[in-house]
Image: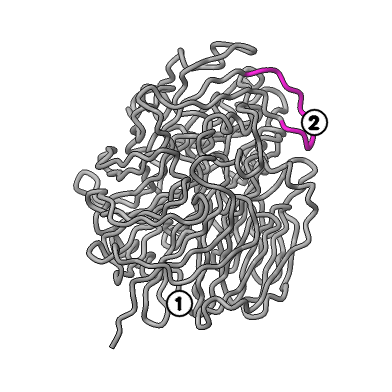
Amino acid sequence: MRGRNRVAALLFCLSAFGPASADEPVLQTVDYANTRYSKLDQINAGNVKQLQVAWTFSTGILRGHEGAPLVVGSIMYVHTPFPNIVYALDLDKDGVIVWKYEPKQDPSVIPVMCCDTVNRGLAYADGAIILHQADTTLVSLDAKSGRVNWSVKNGDPAVGETNTATVMPVKDKIIVGISGAEYGARGHITAYDARTGTRLWRGYSTGPDADMIVDPQKTTSLGRPIGENSSLASWEGDQWKTGGGATWGWYSYDPELDLIYYGTANPSTWNPKQRPGDNKWTTAIVARNPDTGMMRWVYQMTPHDEWDYDGVNEMILTDQTVQGTVRPLLTHFDRNGFGYTLDRSTGELLVAEKFDPAVNWATGIDVDKSSGRYGRPLVDPRRSPDRTGEDETTTGICPGAIGAKNEQPAAYSPITRLFYVPTNHICMSYEPFHVTYTPGIPFVGATVTLQPTEDGPETGRFIAWDGVAGRVVWSNTEPFSVWSGALATAGDVVFYGTLEGYLKAVDARTGRELYRFKTPSGIIGNVTTYLHSGRQYVAVLSGVGGWAGIGLAAGLTDPADGAGAVGGYAGLSRYTALGGQLTVFALPELRH
């Protein structure tokens, strides 16, 4: 299977969150390629303005609601933030509760979660719903009854390890990550047996080659072997042991290449003066074999990260024509404000361009293969906290630590060949200070203040991006960061939500707004769609929170709290309030 047929197969298998047969995985990413594209087209650019609320469901939780519901056959599975309740709802009976799973977690995990008590949702495979709880307990639930099949601990909150991410079933394995870089937790990705919960392998982001599961001669970076102990050589002493590189983002998978893709987070501490070197392999894209965990290739986007530019955002897999040849591509919109396109079979860097015009920490990325700086950012020394020094403030850095894009996932339409990207248009001041590592205590070492860019108070944009050309095709400005995941459909409609609480539908080709509806609370969830009894529905979770909404979610008032987000998004409280609700939309039913 070659060229466009390969990605077409990925999209066909997992295009709409159900209905699904017992052997089809159902994923938060919609498909293994992470496109968040649905082939459903009952709702289209011509009729989307007629959408109406079909039904709603209250989750009963008042923190940030990220992720989306899953639909398998006639059952919808809805998750919540901590305490990570799971509901099974009967779609034949307007959402009647079939079963409810409420894990018993120690609330002491809450203050260890850096940026709200969010959870990005469930996955379904082989008759089981898979939940990764905040306290890192991985649970397999019988999809019909809610009975626990097995559970296993993936980390230890006592040393700062928690979970906010979803999981990815691949073949007979469950792939999971970990949060906690702000606590000095050493990032890792782990594979568990889907039937028993037995741990099969674990690959760390930093440390000795054996821990990272790399082959010094066969694992490559930008086409060259990484060499022996590549990570150890890039840290001072044993700092790699508390080096961060968490793996709390999204995962994708190419069945033909048999590779999984994911990103690693920021190095610890945020104070760059304390950790000289490139700090490998934090802020990197990683490709691994799912059966063995062996790393095929790795690319570090922000060596010696000085700004908290995590690399965990999603990797979107497409096959597109580059200079006359169809190539297997990976596109990634990084926190650092650059949109990267790589050959996903080799890790070759093809495109790296700014997707937000405010980006100024670097003037560009060196894409000249003959250069000694190939693949590295061209850092502006005026925006370098390392150069400015400890206990000194570097101002006007764009983007802010919250990123030009954070976890909110983009979508891709094979019809338009465009990516649809929710973004943050925001800058910061950054003051690093010395910090001592203590297990379970924040290991941050920087004071961050977020502020709007010079071109206006608006902090959000929703853009369409050409990943081959590396350019913005159209851009819609929003008052606040767009923290909702996008959904592209075959009806030439793209959906997303706003922090004020609007569900919006726009024309996939022009960005023209076609529909909006104000839900009860700010939307940081990911829009999804499904077909039930021949009728297409659109669904989204409301519930303001996440990093951008942490002030509202946690009742914080100091502008410096939430790594500056409380001050940066102070005006949000005038537009929305707390709430946890699922809202389901449909076109009016035809009357005969």
The relative height of residue 476 versus residue 173 in the rendered view (above or below) is above
Task: List x then y, in percent, for residue 486.
Answer: 40, 53
Is 84 situated left or right of 359 in this image? right
Which element is circle 1 on?
loop
Which image quadrant: the N terminus?
A: bottom left
Which image quadrant: the C terminus?
A: bottom left
Which of discs 1 and 2 lies nearer the camera? The answer is 1
Residue projecting furthest to the left: 324
Residue 491 makes an appearance in the image: yes
Q: How many marks?
A: 2
Which label sits on residue 19? 1
Q: Type of residue at label 2?
A: Thr
Query: Which residue bears the numbered disc 2?
Result: 438
Residue projecting furthest to the front: 574
Crowdedness of circle 2 by 10 Å Cα count: few (<14), some, many (20+)?
A: few
> Which is more toward the observer, 472 or 386?
472
Task: List x then y, in percent, for residue 479.
Answer: 40, 38
Task: List x then y, in percent, for residue 365.
Answer: 37, 27
Q: Are marks 1 and 2 in contact (CB under 8 Å)?
A: no
Q: Type of residue at label 1?
A: Pro
> Which is more toward the observer, 579 or 168?
579
> Which is more toward the observer, 381 or 231?
381
